[in-house]
Amino acid sequence: MNPAEEPPGGDYVAYIDRLVNRGGGQPGSVRPAARRGLARAGLSRQPAEPAQPSLPGREAAAPARPAPPRRAPQAPDSLASRSSRGRKGLVMQGIAAVLAVLGLRMLQAAGRTGTDVTDYFPGGFMLVFAWIFLKAGAGMRRAARAPLPDLPALATRRGGASGNPSATPRT
């Protein structure tokens, strides 16, 4: 459409709506063909029966939220990941020390030069950040030093660890 022309019927709102919503549906919606494929595979997210809201009003009109995605169970920490976490915590504590020194120097400079309370804010702000980094680093190091979980008992075979019957001890 030429910018000098008007939309058919002079309805600009409907014209813009048609341009913006060209049949794509709502963001995040599943197309009907894909929905049928999910239903055939038994992976449909649609509930068997729609839930009946108990409260009238706006809450009743709001759709129910989908369940959050499930996370895969995590493997136990390896020694390398624990060591890495401990080193990251040590680096964070080093950053906290640098921030604390800078914050204290800023407070000293504010005490020498000014009498206004706002002169102390940057130094105090740096000390707050130093405290946050110190606590985060200490938490990471504490998690890295936590005792390892107990391992399950080893399954042994009748023939010994190698499975060789001649390796079994004689009684």
Image (spheres, helix red, strand yellow):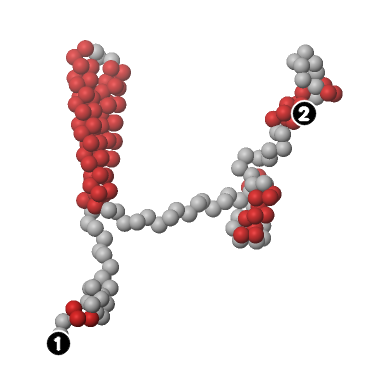
Q: Nearer the viewer, residue 158 or 10?
A: 158
Q: Quadrant of residue 76?
A: bottom left
Q: Could you tell me the amino acid type at mark 1?
A: Thr
Taking the view exactly as shown, the residue that stands out farthest to the left is: 171
Q: How many numbered marks, from 0 up?
A: 2
Place of residue 78 in the rendered image (x, y in percent of width and height, measured from the top left): 27, 53
The reply to whether residue 54 is visible in this rendering is no
Q: Which structural element holds mark 2? A: helix
Q: Nearer the viewer, residue 117 or 23?
A: 23
Look at the numbered discs 1 and 2 and tell me whether their residues touch, using CB distance below 8 Å.
no
Residue that numbered label 2 is attached to: 14
Task: Judge the density around disc 2: few (<14), some (14-19), many (≥20) Cα neighbours within 10 Å.
Answer: few
Q: Which structural element holds mark 1? A: loop
Residue that numbered label 1 is attached to: 171
Location of residue 119 with respect to 25 vertically, above or below? above
In three-dimensional space, the C-alpha distance between marks 1 and 2, rounded to whole angstroms, equals: 93 Å
